[in-house]
């Protein structure tokens, strides 16, 4: 995979990995707070940094069938949420290419 | 052989026929005769003056100087029919060269035979007057030398009188000097400032003081010769040929051939021959893997040679650093054998940076925000330094050896004493450092790095086109800016700052402290001129998108640029022309992360890769090709070298040249493949 450095974000509110504080996303790229993950509340983001994406996986969700990938912290490998590759319901298409981060796995960092 | 040839061409065939008396009455002392022909020749060129040569000529009865030589009349004016070279110019330069080295008679003979004279009597007198300090005569002679314009004539006069004045001041004859200043220099209507400067020199109490202030090395130094060189600019070169003109032209030929020699990496003591154009062989270039070092259990991210060139340190994602040594101390003397001498295992995270102390006694490593100092002969961890709050990305010892500097993604540059005590901090820099380099002259620190990713504002309407980026590590939401900063090391002030679009992952400085080498994503290595702060060369072909890829200078006079690449290839360019010389295959899948040229061996460098190995690249040497025809066993030393195993620490596998390199068809590759089938 090669060596790479983590990215650092700037802005009023930065969300980081609760395990290792690695920067992940800012409030500016948050699209919705109305999601649920395995650990409770989850947020939908337009863009996330410093993550590794897993293999695509077919998963039935409350809003229908989706193809998603788990996303891991690049530093500590903690599973942080998932990314939507494909939504089959037309009403859910807007989620494609977007990321879910679980609120309980995030901390505010600066 | 050569001597005989020479003798045939010369009338002095004194001792080749065994009868030294022929050489002339005074030419040989009895002792030198028995030394044989070479001693005789030496005697002529060094020990004996032109008269001896002259008598040798007479003794052989060939010609009598000046009288029997008839001028040879040649048609045309060029050296050859189809040549651009003017015959008169050529011959006059030859005469000048002959005279310079002391072949006075030959020069005279050539003058007589060609009808060309090197220079007129007036010119040689003028030269002598200047060198002997006969200023008034020199000025009179100057009138006859055809100085083209009036102004040049006065300038030349001024230069002569200036020398005269300075010599008088030096000789402590202020009254005469003043006279020269008032009556000879002042009337020349020179720049008043210049005259003022000259007049102030008369106050110099010591000759030493005068020489320093005037930037002039005195009557007994080179100043008269220097004056003569300067006067050449005013006198037409057809009248007075510039000094050592032939040599100047040959030097230019050499310099041109040197520029055209893209593989230029000569072994020490290689001489420049006039007989053939200079060209270094491609096969003298380190393009063959002679050893593969395989002990790391994960990607190897960085490598660095000790200053004595005998050790190589490697940093790996497997959380260890290894010090490799060429040749094992106990059971082998083979220089081609490498051993994993010390495995340094205390780090909790992948190891990213390395730096050898100037005496090679201490190795620094960094892993995330932690720096460790190791005893490089015992492998003991001396100190653990925790000042940085984010990943340390660069380590470098100060050129005076008094300490070292670390830089990191926390924007900090920290200076440490050699014993690991915190000395000083730079404060927070404008960038998160990804690398830095200190110029060897200790004047500057050049840092590269990134700024923070600015806040991203998503479009008001979510995109619904459903297109997907390919998997892998996600791209940043928006692009961060990257920047190179040049600091003055003494003042810590930023001298220069420039913004880049893509990642900057490596910066190196040239030995002469004048140039920078940086890796810039995507797919580019650049050289910057530190004096003008401009890019002067770009090297392409490599692949670099999101990973840390490093490059280095290498070879004799740092003639080459080498870089890792994300396509498992090592790229080598000719520094001056930017031409790609080699795309060296061999590493397995993934990136070649770093390269490092051996500081003591211009024909060796190393590369490290995601494939968990380090490759040592060397020149094949002439022996390998000789063996090719006889289909003997592979003579490459490392292939037969025994496998080293440090107990319980993994294996070092020695591999033959180009082992694992597929699809590379050249004579060596095919040969080795062939050998493997036997």
Image (cartoon, helix red, strand yellow):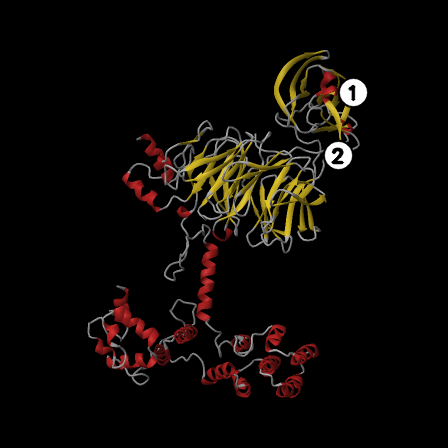
**Is B612 rendered above or below residue B247?**
above
Task: Answer with left or right where residue A33 lies relative to residue B25.
Answer: right
* Quarter location, residue B83: bottom left
> In the image, is residue B197 above or below residue B477?
below
Quadrant, the N terminus of chain B: bottom left
Viewer-proximal residue among B271 and B653: B653
Task: From this view, report whether residue B448 is shown above or below residue B150.
Answer: above
In which quadrant is the C terminus of chain B drawn?
top left
Which image quarter: residue B418?
Answer: top right
Image coords of residue A106 (percent x, y)? 73, 23
Chain of the residue that carries numbered disc 2 in the rendered image: A
* Residue B621 shown left or right of residue B218 in the figure: left
Residue B341 seen from this side: yes
Q: Secondary structure at mark 2?
A: loop
Chain at numbered mark 1: A
Q: Nearer the viewer, residue B438 or B579?
A: B438
Q: Which residue position holds label 2?
A: A10
Q: Earlier in the sequence, mark 1 or mark 2?
A: 2
Q: Residue at x 43, y 78 (%)?
A: B118
Give the residue furthest to the left. Answer: B18
């Amino acid at each position: 995979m090669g060596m790479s450095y983590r990215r650092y974000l700037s802005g009023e509110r930065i969300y980081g990995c609760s395990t290792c504080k690695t920067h992940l996303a800012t409030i500016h790229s948050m699209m919705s707070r109305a999601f649920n993950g395995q650990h409770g509340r989850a947020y939908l983001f337009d863009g996330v940094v410093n993550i590794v994406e897993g293999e695509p996986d077919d998963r039935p969700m409350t809003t229908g069938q989706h193809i998603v990938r788990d996303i891991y912290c690049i530093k500590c490998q903690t599973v942080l949420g998932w990314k939507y590759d494909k939504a089959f319901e037309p009403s859910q298409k807007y989620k494609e290419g977007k990321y879910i981060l679980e609120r309980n796995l995030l901390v505010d960092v600066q | 052989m050569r001597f005989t040839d020479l003798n045939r061409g010369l009338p002095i065939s004194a001792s080749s026929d065994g009868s030294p008396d022929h050489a002339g009455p005074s030419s040989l002392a009895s002792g030198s005769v028995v030394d044989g022909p070479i001693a005789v020749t030496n005697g002529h060129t060094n020990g004996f003056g032109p008269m001896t040569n002259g008598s040798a000529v007479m003794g052989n009865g060939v010609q009598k100087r000046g009288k029997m030589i008839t001028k040879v009349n040649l048609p045309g004016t060029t050296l050859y029919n189809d040549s651009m070279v003017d015959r008169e110019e050529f011959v006059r330069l030859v005469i000048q060269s002959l005279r310079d080295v002391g072949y006075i008679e030959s020069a005279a003979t050539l003058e007589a035979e060609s009808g060309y004279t090197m220079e007129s009597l007036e010119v040689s007198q003028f030269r002598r007057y200047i060198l002997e300090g006969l200023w008034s005569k020199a000025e009179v002679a100057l009138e006859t030398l055809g100085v083209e314009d009036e102004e040049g004539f006065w300038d030349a006069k001024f230069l002569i009188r200036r020398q005269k004045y300075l010599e008088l001041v030096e000789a402590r004859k202020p009254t005469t000097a003043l006279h020269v200043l008032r009556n000879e220099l002042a009337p020349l209507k020179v720049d008043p400032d210049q005259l003022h400067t000259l007049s102030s020199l008369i106050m110099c109490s010591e000759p030493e003081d005068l020489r320093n202030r005037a930037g002039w090395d005195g009557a007994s130094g080179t100043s008269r010769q220097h004056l003569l060189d300067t006067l050449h600019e005013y006198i037409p070169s057809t009248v007075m040929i510039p000094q050592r003109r032939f040599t100047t032209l040959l030097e230019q030929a050499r310099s041109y051939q040197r520029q055209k020699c893209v593989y230029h990496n000569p072994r020490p003591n290689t001489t420049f021959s006039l007989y053939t154009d200079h060209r270094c062989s491609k096969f003298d270039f380190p393009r063959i893997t002679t050893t593969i070092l395989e002990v790391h259990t994960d990607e190897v991210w960085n490598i660095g040679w000790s200053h004595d060139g005998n050790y190589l340190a490697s940093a790996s994602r497997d959380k260890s650093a290894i010090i490799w040594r060429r040749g094992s101390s106990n059971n082998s003397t083979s220089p081609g054998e490498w051993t994993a001498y010390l495995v340094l295992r205390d780090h909790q995270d992948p190891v990213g940076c390395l730096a050898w102390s100037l005496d090679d006694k201490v190795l620094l490593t960094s892993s995330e925000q932690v720096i460790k100092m190791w005893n490089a002969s015992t492998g003991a961890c001396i100190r653990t330094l925790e000042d940085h709050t984010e990943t340390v990305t660069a380590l470098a010892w100060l050129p005076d050896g008094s300490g070292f500097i670390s830089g990191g993604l926390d924007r900090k540059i920290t200076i440490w004493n050699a014993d690991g005590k915190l000395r000083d901090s730079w404060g927070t820099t404008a960038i998160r450092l990804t690398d830095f380099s200190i110029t060897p002259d200790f004047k500057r620190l050049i840092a590269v790095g990134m700024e923070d990713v600015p806040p991203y504002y998503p479009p008001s309407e979510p995109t619904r086109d459903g297109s997907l980026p390919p998997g892998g590590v996600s791209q940043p939401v928006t692009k961060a800016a990257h920047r190179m900063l040049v600091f003055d090391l003494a003042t810590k002030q930023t001298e220069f700052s420039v913004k880049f679009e893509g990642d900057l992952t490596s910066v190196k400085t040239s030995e002469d402290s004048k140039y920078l080498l940086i890796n810039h994503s995507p797919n580019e290595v650049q050289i910057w001129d530190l004096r003008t702060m401009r890019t002067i060369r770009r090297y392409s072909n490599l692949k670099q998108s999101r990973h840390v890829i490093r490059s280095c200078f290498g070879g004799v006079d740092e003639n080459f640029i080498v870089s890792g690449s994300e396509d498992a290839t090592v790229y080598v360019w000719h520094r001056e022309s930017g031409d790609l010389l080699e795309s060296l295959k061999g590493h397995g899948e993934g990136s070649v992360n770093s390269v490092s040229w051996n500081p003591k061996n211009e024909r060796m460098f190393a590369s490290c890769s995601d494939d968990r190995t380090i490759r040592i690249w060397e020149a094949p040497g002439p022996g390998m090709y000789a063996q090719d025809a006889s289909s003997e066993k592979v003579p490459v030393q490392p292939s037969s070298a025994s496998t080293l195993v440090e107990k319980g620490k993994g294996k070092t596998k020695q591999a033959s040249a180009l082992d694992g390199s597929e699809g590379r068809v050249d004579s060596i590759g095919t040969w080795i493949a062939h050998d493997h089938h036997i």
